[in-house]
Image (tube, rainbow, N blue to C red):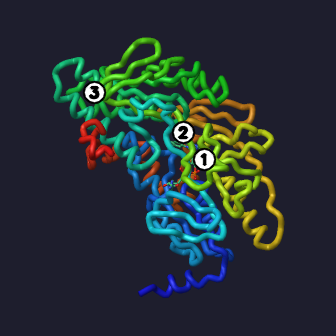
C-alpha cells in the first residue's frame, strides 16, 4: 500500500528528471531542483554521497567513514519533489527515453548522467588485478584494513625480508591523491607506529611513491611541485620519478628501469577514466572515456540528455579546449549551471553556455604542510595547510550540515587519539579468493 507521500510524488504534474549518480555533480542538480516544478528521481548504486577528497583520511584511519559519507535519504528527506532509489543503471535508450536499471526500466523527460570516474590502469592488467584502488569508501576501508593487517603480520614475523615486504607500501601516481596518501602514511610511521607498535622496528617501514613524470603534482606550478617533493622527503617518503610500473604480483612489482620492489601493498592512484554505460555510443569519446557535450552539457543530437562532472568532456570552453580537469569543483559548477539552464528552459528562455571558474589547486602533505596554487601565486607550509583545512572543513560542514561534524572532524584529525585503527572487515586479496569467486 503506497504512502501518502508516494501518492503525492507520483501525481506531481511536472517533467520527470532522472539524475543518475549522486556525486558532487548529481547532488548539486538534485539540491538545485528541490521544490522547483520538476519531478526528480535520483538513482545511485550506493545509498550515500561520498566526499572523495578526504578518502585518503579514511584509508589512513584519520577519519571514520561516517565523517565523509552522507546518506541520500537524509539529504532528500525534506524535498517532496525528489525521490531516491538505490539502483545501478546499465543502459539508456534515448529513442524511448528510458534508462535500464537493476530496478527495471524507468522513463524520463530529462536525463542527467553524473556517473563520475573510475580507476584507469592504462591496460596494465597485472596491476588491475593486484593493486588496491581508492575511489570509494569500501576501497578506502580495504586500504585501512590492509595496512593494519600488514603491521600485525610484520610484528609476528622474524625473517627480515618478509617483514620488509609487509612494511613496504608502494603508491603509484604522484598526483594529489598519491601525494596526500603518501604523506598520511608517513605520518603514521612517525607517530602511531612508534607509540602503538613498540615491538616493531618502525624504521623498516618504507613508503615509495612512483610516477612516470619528471615531477610530483605535474598539474600544479613548478614551485608547488618542488615544495611538495621537499615535504615528502622531510617525511621520509621515497619518491621515484620517470619510472613506470610494468607488472607484478602479490609480492613484488617490476619497474621500467629493470628494478623490482618487494611489497605486499600497491595502491594505484595513477589515473582515472570516465564511467560510461551503453546506449549513447555516438557521444562517447572512447580515447578519453568521457561523453562529448556542448557548452550547456547537452549531448549533441540526443535530445534531453545532459552529462556533467567527471564523465563529461566539454571542449568548447575557451580556456579548456582539451576538456576540464576531473575535479569536484568542475562537477559542482556544471551541476549548478545545469540547474539554472533547466529552470530557464522551463520558462521558455534559452540555455546559457558554461564557463569554468578555476579557483586554484591544493594538496596536503602530512599534518602541517600543504601546497596551494591560486592564480599566479603559489605558496606552501603551515599557512597553506590552514587554508586547506579551512576549505575542506567548510565543504564538509555544508555537505553534512552539522556543526558537530566540524568538532568531531577537528578532534579526530588533529589528534592521533582516535580509536578507529580497527580491522573490522579484514581485507582479503583477490588472489586469495578462488577464481570463481573473483568473477
Ligand atoms: C581520492 C580522491 C581524491 C580527490 N581529491 C580531490 C580534491 O582534493 N579536489 C577536487 O576538486 N577533486 C578531488 N577529487 C576528484 C573529485 O572527487 C571528482 O572530480 C568528483 O567526485 C566528480 O564528481 P562526479 O559527480 O562527476 O562523480 P562522483 O562524485 O564520482 O559521483 C558519481 C556517482 O555516480 C554513481 N554511479 C556511478 N555509476 C553508476 C551507475 N551505473 N548507476 C548508478 N549510479 C552510478 C556513484 O555511486 C557515485 O555516487 C578526488 C577524487 C578522489 C578519488
Q: Which residue is mark 1?
A: 310
Q: Secondary structure at mark 2?
A: strand
Give residue 252's quadrant in the image.
top left
Residue 330 visible from this viewpoint = no
- What's the residue at 52%, 67% (across, down)? 75
Label 3 Cα crowd, 10 Å radius (few <14 / some 14-19 / many 20+) = many
Label 2 Cα crowd, 10 Å radius (few <14 / some 14-19 / many 20+) = some
Tell whether circle 1 marks a residue whose Cβ is less than 8 angstroms from ligand 1: yes
Tell me which label, 2 or 1, sits earlier in the chain: 2
Q: Is residue 350 above or below residue 310?
A: below
In the image: residue 289, left or right of residue 341: left
- What's the residue at 53%, 32% (across, down)? 369
Tell whether circle 2 marks a residue whose Cβ is less than 8 angstroms from ligand 1: yes
Residue 298 visible from this viewpoint = yes
Give residue 413's quadrant in the image.
top left
The x and y percentages for residue 272 are: 54, 39
- What's the residue at 76%, 72% (across, down)? 346
In the image: residue 222, left or right of residue 353: left
In front here: 54 or 109? 109
Residue sticking out furthest to the top:
258
Which label is found at residue 166? 3
The x and y percentages for residue 249 are: 33, 27
Quarter holding the N terminus is bottom left
* Label 2 to label 1: alpha-carbon separation: 9 Å
Q: Which residue is mark 2?
A: 272
Q: Secondary structure at mark 1?
A: helix
* Label 1 to label 3: alpha-carbon separation: 35 Å
* Label 3 to label 2: alpha-carbon separation: 27 Å
Tell me which label, 1 or 3, sits earlier in the chain: 3
The x and y percentages for residue 392 are: 56, 47
Amino acid at each position: 500500500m503506497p504512502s501518502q507521500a508516494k501518492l503525492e510524488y507520483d501525481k506531481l504534474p511536472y517533467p520527470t528528471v532522472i539524475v543518475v549518480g549522486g556525486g558532487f555533480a548529481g547532488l548539486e542538480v538534485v539540491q538545485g531542483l528541490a521544490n522547483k516544478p520538476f519531478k526528480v528521481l535520483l538513482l545511485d548504486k550506493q545509498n550515500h554521497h561520498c566526499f572523495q577528497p578526504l578518502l585518503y583520511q579514511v584509508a589512513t584511519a584519520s577519519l571514520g567513514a561516517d565523517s565523509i559519507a552522507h546518506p541520500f535519504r537524509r539529504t532528500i528527506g525534506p524535498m517532496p519533489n525528489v525521490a531516491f532509489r538505490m539502483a545501478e543503471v546499465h543502459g539508456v535508450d534515448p529513442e524511448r527515453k528510458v534508462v535500464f536499471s537493476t530496478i527495471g526500466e524507468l522513463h524520463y523527460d530529462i536525463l542527467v548522467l553524473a556517473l563520475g570516474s573510475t580507476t584507469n590502469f592504462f591496460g596494465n592488467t597485472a596491476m588491475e588485478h593486484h593493486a588496491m584502488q581508492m575511489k570509494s569508501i569500501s576501497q578506502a576501508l580495504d586500504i585501512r584494513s590492509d595496512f593494519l593487517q600488514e603491521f600485525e603480520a610484520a610484528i609476528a614475523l622474524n625473517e627480515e625480508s618478509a617483514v620488509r615486504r609487509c612494511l613496504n607500501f608502494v603508491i603509484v601516481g604522484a598526483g594529489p591523491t598519491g601525494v596526500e596518501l603518501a604523506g598520511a602514511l608517513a605520518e603514521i610511521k612517525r607517530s602511531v607506529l612508534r607509540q602503538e607498535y613498540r615491538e616493531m622496528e618502525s624504521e623498516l617501514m618504507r613508503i615509495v611513491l612512483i610516477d612516470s613524470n619528471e615531477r610530483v603534482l605535474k598539474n600544479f606550478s613548478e614551485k608547488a611541485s618542488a615544495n611538495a617533493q621537499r615535504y615528502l622527503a622531510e617525511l621520509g617518503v621515497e619518491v621515484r620519478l620517470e619510472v613506470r610500473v610494468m607488472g607484478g604480483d602479490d609480492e613484488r612489482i617490476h619497474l621500467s628501469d629493470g628494478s623490482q620492489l618487494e611489497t605486499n601493498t600497491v595502491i594505484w592512484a595513477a589515473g582515472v577514466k570516465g564511467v560510461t554505460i551503453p546506449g549513447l555510443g555516438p557521444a562517447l569519446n572512447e580515447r578519453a572515456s568521457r561523453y562529448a557535450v556542448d557548452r550547456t552539457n547537452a549531448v549533441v543530437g540526443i535530445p534531453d540528455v545532459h552529462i556533467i562532472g567527471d564523465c563529461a568532456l566539454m571542449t568548447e570552453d575557451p580556456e579548456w579546449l582539451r576538456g576540464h580537469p576531473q575535479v569536484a569543483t568542475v562537477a559542482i559548477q556544471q551541476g549548478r549551471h545545469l540547474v539554472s539552464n533547466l529552470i530557464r528552459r522551463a520558462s521558455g528562455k534559452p540555455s546559457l553556455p558554461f564557463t569554468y571558474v578555476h579557483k586554484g589547486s591544493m594538496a596536503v602533505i602530512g599534518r602541517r604542510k600543504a601546497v596551494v596554487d591560486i592564480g599566479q601565486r603559489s605558496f606552501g607550509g603551515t599557512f597553506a595547510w590552514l587554508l586547506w583545512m579551512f576549505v575542506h572543513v567548510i565543504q564538509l560542514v555544508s555537505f553534512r550540515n552539522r556543526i558537530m561534524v566540524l568538532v568531531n572532524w577537528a578532534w579526530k584529525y588533529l589528534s592521533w587519539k582516535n580509536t578507529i585503527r580497527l580491522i573490522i572487515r579484514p581485507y582479503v586479496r583477490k588472489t586469495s579468493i578462488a577464481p570463481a569467486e573473483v568473477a
